[in-house]
Image (cartoon, helix red, strand yellow):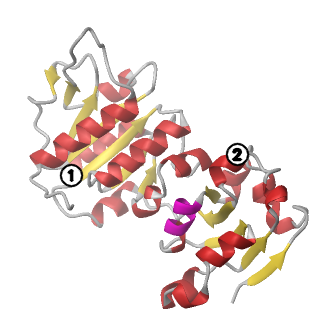
Amino acid sequence: MSNVQYITSLDLPELQPYRTLRRPIEHAKQGIFVAEGEKVVRRLLVSKLTIVSMLMTKDWYDQILPINQLTTHQLTTNFPPFIFIAEKKLLETIVGYNLHQGVMAVAKVPIQRSLEETISTLNNPFLLVALDGLVSAENVGVVVRNSAGFGADAILVGETSSSPYLRRAVRNSMGAVFQLPVVHLSNLGEGLKTLKQTYHTRIIAADPKGEITLQEANLTGNICIIFGNEGEGISSEVLDVCTDCVAIPMLNDTDSLNVASASAVFLYEARKQKGLRFEV
């Protein structure tokens, strides 16, 4: 059972991750991430990830953690060893109170699988999403959420992209990152070549300057859709690996959509072409 403690300061060593929300590099080195807000924390609690601790007000504790509402799995494998309860005034001293709403948790980043290990767990045809130089954690989070919502099988994160486990990315994914395999690649271009040559995967660049439109693109079979940097787009090294460069047709002299919106359009079309039904 958890060690439930009422606290009046954030001085305990176990509270270090909450004191350092602005230091994502420290969290990455520790292999942890922070989840904030009711919906995200609830989704974390029912995920398969390992929760290290939770910090919340007494009201949230009474709502989220009544023992009689928790499953056997949660009580035995995913119940946090430390639960800290504090007054609202103390939690307001932590950055982003309006976003974390007085309820937060720290969990371990899943053990990273290789690209090959991840592919071995997927059924054909698979749908992958790759991030090339996507630096805004907020955009990364929304792309992850869209990927989960439209049935992507995994997220590939290039060496120049922000991690989906950054605090703001987790928040903007609304916890969708807990449901998707994430593969961090030290060389995205080489990983894409492996997909292309070994797994017969079409590499699709989401590119406003693409030679074909989304309606013309073949998104059946094994595919990997790449979304690039918010300003510069997809790098030339990655474009060289791509099978097709595909643009969303725009009207009214609009040159492009932001990457988060574009990901929703591409993923909807991919799912439609694959003939997968949408649950309602």
150 vs 108, left or right, is: left
55 vs 205, left or right, is: right
Q: Position of residue 108 (x, y in %)?
A: 61, 65
Picture layout, residue 182 above or below residue 61: above
Q: Position of residue 231 (x, y in %)?
A: 46, 19
Q: Nearer the viewer, residue 197 or 62?
A: 62
Would residue 186 be seen by someone viewing this image from the given angle?
no
Secondary structure that dominates the magenta span: helix
Q: The residue tagged with tag 1: helix, strand or loop?
A: loop
Picture layout, residue 163 above or below residue 114: above
User: What amino acid does circle 1 point to?
Assistant: Tyr
Picture layout, residue 177 above or below residue 261: below
Image point (43%, 53%), residue name: 183
N-terminal of the pair, mark 2 or mark 1, is 2
Q: Which residue is mark 1?
A: 199
- Residues packed near mark 2 inside 10 Å, few (<14), some (14 to 19) or many (20 plus): few
Q: Position of residue 119 (x, y in %)?
A: 30, 59
For this orientation, the residue located farthest to the front is 59
Q: Magenta includes 39? A: yes
Segment colored magenta: 38-43
Marks 2, 1: nearer the viewer: 2
User: What amino acid does circle 2 point to?
Assistant: Gly
155 vs 10, left or right, is: left
Q: Nearer the viewer, residue 161 or 52?
A: 52
Image point (54%, 73%), residue name: 45
Image point (24%, 37%), residue name: 266
Q: Which residue is mark 2?
A: 96
144 vs 15, left or right, is: left
Quadrant into which the N terminus falls: bottom right
